Image (cartoon, rainbow, N blue to C red):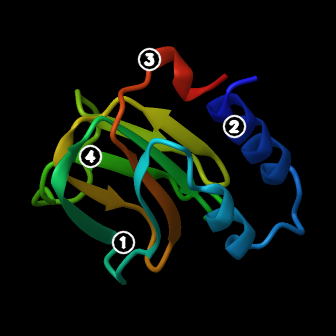
Amino acid sequence: MTDNETFLDELRRLFGNQEATIQRWMELLKPPDGQWTELIVLSAAGVAERSQPRAFESVCALNFGAGAGTLTVAQGPAAAGGAPAAGPGLMQIPAGDWGLFPLRGRHLTLYGGANAVVGLILMSVPVPPAFGKL
């Protein structure tokens, strides 16, 4: 098993465990190729923007929210009028779920519920599109 497969197996195991803490999640969110790992609390408006000096090739996001709160991760700066509904450079993650996608760039915006907690990993290597849900 590769390091990435081991990492994803651990994520799957912990998502089913309601006792897991966010601190433990953040320890796991350090894959070998990760260039940036962060725990983010979205603003009261449900938005957070991130810019990086180096381009990222893949994004893994974990939506720690509960209920029906969907997290949207979009390339580029925040859009007027809220989260885009669909299109390239966009991924949507239901509450309590995660996504790993080949989004590329230096800037991204997270949209979700007010004060939602999100785990974010920006990776310096691309992942194949099918790698998002194994």
- Alpha-carbon span between mark 3 and mark 1: 29 Å
Q: Which amino acid does label 4 sit on?
A: Ala
Element class at badge 2: helix
Q: Which mark is residue 8?
A: 2
- Alpha-carbon span between mark 4 and mark 3: 18 Å
Q: Which badge, 4 or 3, is on the more N-terminal residue?
A: 4
Q: Which amino acid does label 1 sit on?
A: Gly
- The residue indicated by pointer 4 is 74
- The residue indicated by pointer 1 is 46
Element class at badge 1: loop
Nearer the observer: mark 3 or 1; the answer is: 3
Label 2, residues with CA under 10 Å away: few <14, some 14-19, many ≥20: some
Image quarter of the N terminus:
top right
Label 4, residues with CA under 10 Å away: few <14, some 14-19, many ≥20: many
Nearer the observer: mark 4 or 3; the answer is: 3
- The residue indicated by pointer 3 is 128
Image quarter of the C terminus:
top right
Q: Which of 131 and 69 is in front in this view?
A: 131
